[in-house]
Image (cartoon, helix red, strand yellow):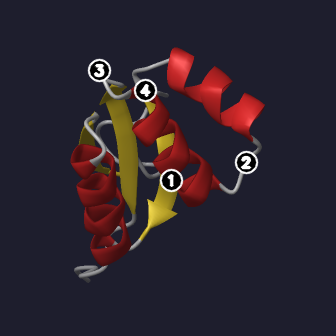
């Protein structure tokens, strides 16, 4: 059985030069405080969202890129998949 709706992960790979703009987007996407959002950004590359639909992931990445960040959509590693750790 093939699953059409594979959960996606949004990864912030680099904050870029417009830190405050990216901070606002990260805060909006994660619903975290300013401080927690800043701590999360400082850990880049870091997962911002995990297990969301492809459409939501693409929207989040577009918002991050518009703010000046570098971000990617990656398929979520599911237990038992060849890419997951044993």
Mark linked to residue 19: 4
Q: What residue did someone put label 1 on? A: 50
Residue 14 horizontal/vertical position (percent)? 31, 23
Question: Going from the N terminus, do you reach mark 4 or mark 2 first?
Answer: 4
Task: Depth check: give the residue in front, 85 or 35.
Answer: 35
Quarter occupied by the N terminus: bottom left
Question: Going from the N terminus, do you reach mark 1 or mark 2 first?
Answer: 2
Task: Depth check: give the residue in front, 5 or 70.
Answer: 70
Residue 53 horizontal/vertical position (percent)? 38, 74
Question: Going from the N terminus, do you reach mark 3 or mark 1 first?
Answer: 3
Mark linked to residue 17: 3
Determine contact: label 3, label 2, CB under 8 Å.
no
Q: Dot 3 lies on which element?
A: loop
State the residue at coordinates (71%, 38%): 34
Which is closer to the viewer, label 1 or label 4?
Answer: 4
Give the spatial CA distance, label 1 vs label 2: 15 Å
Q: Dot 4 lies on which element?
A: helix
């Amino acid at each position: 059985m093939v699953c059409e709706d594979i959960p996606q992960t949004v990864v912030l790979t680099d904050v870029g030069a417009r830190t405050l703009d990216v901070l606002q987007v990260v805060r909006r996407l994660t619903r975290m405080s300013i401080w927690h959002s800043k701590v999360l950004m400082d850990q880049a590359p870091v997962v911002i969202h995990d297990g969301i639909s492809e459409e939501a992931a693409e929207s989040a990445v577009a918002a991050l890129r518009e703010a000046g960040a570098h971000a990617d959509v990656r398929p979520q590693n599911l237990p038992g998949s060849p890419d997951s750790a044993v």
